[in-house]
Image: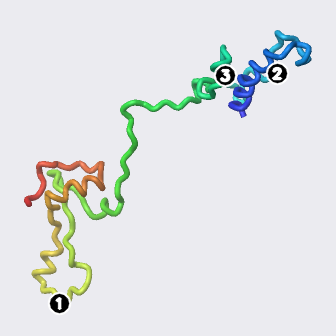
Amino acid sequence: MAMSLSLARLALRPVLQSLPAAASKRPANASLSFPANSFFGAPLAVANTAATALSPAASLPRSLSVVAKAGNGYKMKTHKASAKRFRVTGTGKIVRRCAGKQHLLSKKNAKRRKRLSKMVQVNKRDYSNVMGALPYLKVNKKAGGEY
C-alpha cells in the first residue's frame, strides 16, 4: 500500500501543478493530501523533477530497492541420493559400496560375498561426476584412484 501511495503522489504532482488553480479548486501552493509516512512509519519517496516521477525505478525508496551483492553467488544443492551412496575417507578419498550384494546371494560363494561387502575407492575418472553432485564434499583431488 505504501508503494502505491508513493507512486500516486509522484505521478499526480506534475499533472496537478499544470492545472490552473481555479480548475483544481485548491490553492496552487497546497501540498497533496497523501501522508508523508507510509503505513509502517517509513518515509515515502519524494522526487524533485517530473522526469524522475515518470520512471518507477527512480521513485523506489532506497530501502526497498534490490541490490545484488558481489561475490555472493547462489548456494549449490547437494544431490541427496549421491550423498547417501558416497563418503570421504580421512585421507580425502571417495569410497562407495560394490554392486551385486542385494539379492540372489545363494548362488554366490562366500569369498565373492565377502569381497562385495567391502567399500571400494571411486575411479579417478568418476571424481568429477561425484563432486558435481556433491559440491561441498571435502575431497583430496590428488588422492583419486587409478585408471
- Gap between marks 1 and 3 measured at Cα: 81 Å
Q: Residue at x 74, y 29 (%)?
A: 5
Q: Which residue is mark 3?
A: 53
In this rendering, the answer to whether 132 lies above or below 75 is below
In this rendering, the answer to whether 60 lies above or below 29 is below
Q: Is residue 4 left or right of residue 116?
A: right
- Gap between marks 2 and 3 measured at Cα: 17 Å
Q: Is residue 123 left or right of residue 63?
A: left
Q: Residue type at mark 2?
A: Ser
Residue furthest top in the image? 29
Q: Which residue is mark 2?
A: 33
- Of labels 1 and 2, the one closer to you: 2
Q: Secondary structure at mark 3?
A: helix
Return the disc, 2 or 3, that comes first in the chain's sequence.
Answer: 2
Residue 62 percent location from the top left of the image: 58, 24
Tag 1 near tag 3, CB within 8 Å: no
